[in-house]
Image (tube, grey):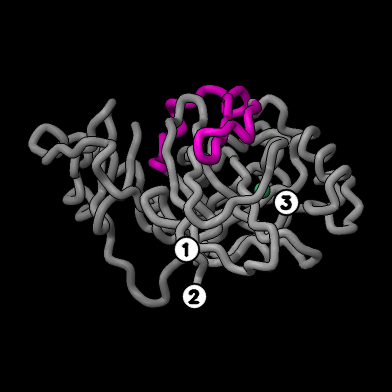
Amino acid sequence: MKLCRFNEGRFGLVEGAYIYDVTAALDVLPTVRYPAPWQDNLIAHLGMVREEALRLKDEAERFDVDGVKFLSPVANPPKIIGAPINYQAHIDESVKDQGIAHGRSVTSIHDWGLFLKSSTSLIGFGEQILLRRADRRNDHECELAVIIGKPCNKVSRDEALSFVAGYAIGLDMTVRGPEFQCWRKSVDTYSVLGPWLITADEIDDPDQLDLRLEVNGEVRQSSNTKHLVLDVSGLIEMASSMYALMPGDILMTGTPAGVGPVVPGDVIFASVERIGQASVQVGARYA
Ligand code: MN
């Protein structure tokens, strides 16, 4: 099942070229009282919401997929986790191009560990990426994004996928420079997720998916998640070896080769096999 958030906070069930407005399905969610648990309320109760969405679909108002503004399918992620240098071809280009590496020793993800991006950097494909730091390279990174569905801690790679709620396309936008990733990748609007969440039962093997990114129609990135150095199960194992994973956590699995700069006015098109495709605009620079 594909689920999305669109327009002014509507909730939708995506089928083919249509979105069914099943916002009323959110009425099954429990009321959150202060202090709120570290989880996305919708993702934590996805099973209930799915059932209700299906029940409501036949009576629901229908929209064209091309006619809506997509918001991030996860509204309140406790964490956004990033995976650095997780495709060999991206490691190779980072070694060659100091515009990417900035003097860092590009060794392996096992040496670097994972990084966190600010939760408030998150937008959907219907919003705009607003660039900061005009003096810097602002790069696109097209990635498979994994949405965690259940709390877990210190999980083995064998059980890792059982904690996944679903998948989406992720753009890990990046200001290049010498600082830590958590600084350069946490800019408002620098995490793009969507256009919808596809539930995990529809993806047999997340490590066999083509992914592709174009800027203004020019192909910049084209690869397959089979080239991940640390695969999806391995990334969940690694992340949860250090901290608990919570419903709604987003794990961006790393970028293949072909990263490069974008400027205001560019249109980024991204697709991941079995999930879908979407475009997002690079807006004016942040004032
Ligand atoms: Mn990345």
Q: Give the residue type that dot 1 points to.
A: Ala
Marks 1 and 2 close (CB-CB < 8 Å) = yes
Spatial CA span between label 3 and label 1: 40 Å
Residue 275 x, y percent position in the rendering: 45, 31
Q: Which residue is mark 2?
A: 287
Residue marked by disc 3 = 241
Magenta residue check for 75: no
- Say if mark 2 contacts mark 3, CB within 8 Å: no
Where 84 sits versus 285, above or below?
above
Which residue is pictured at 53% across the width and 55% down the height? 191
Stretch of the chain drawn in magenta:
195-223
Q: Nearer the viewer, mark 3 or mark 1?
A: 1
State the CA–CA distance, disc 1 to disc 2: 8 Å
**Looking at the image, is mark 2 or mark 3 earlier in the sequence?**
3
Asked if residue 192 is positioned above or below residue 133 in the image, the reply reads above
Q: Is residue 62 above or below residue 17?
A: below
x, y (%) of residue 206? 57, 28
Q: Vertical placement of 93 versus 9: above or below? A: above
Q: Which mark is residue 284?
A: 1
User: Relative to residue 102, is residue 263 drawn left or right?
Assistant: left
SS at mark 1 in the image: loop
Q: Secondary structure at mark 3?
A: loop
Residue 135 location, x and y as percent? 69, 67
Q: Residues within 10 Å of mark 2 (few under 14, many from 20)?
A: few
Pick the front one: 178 or 253:
178
Residue 211 located within the stretch drawn in magenta: yes
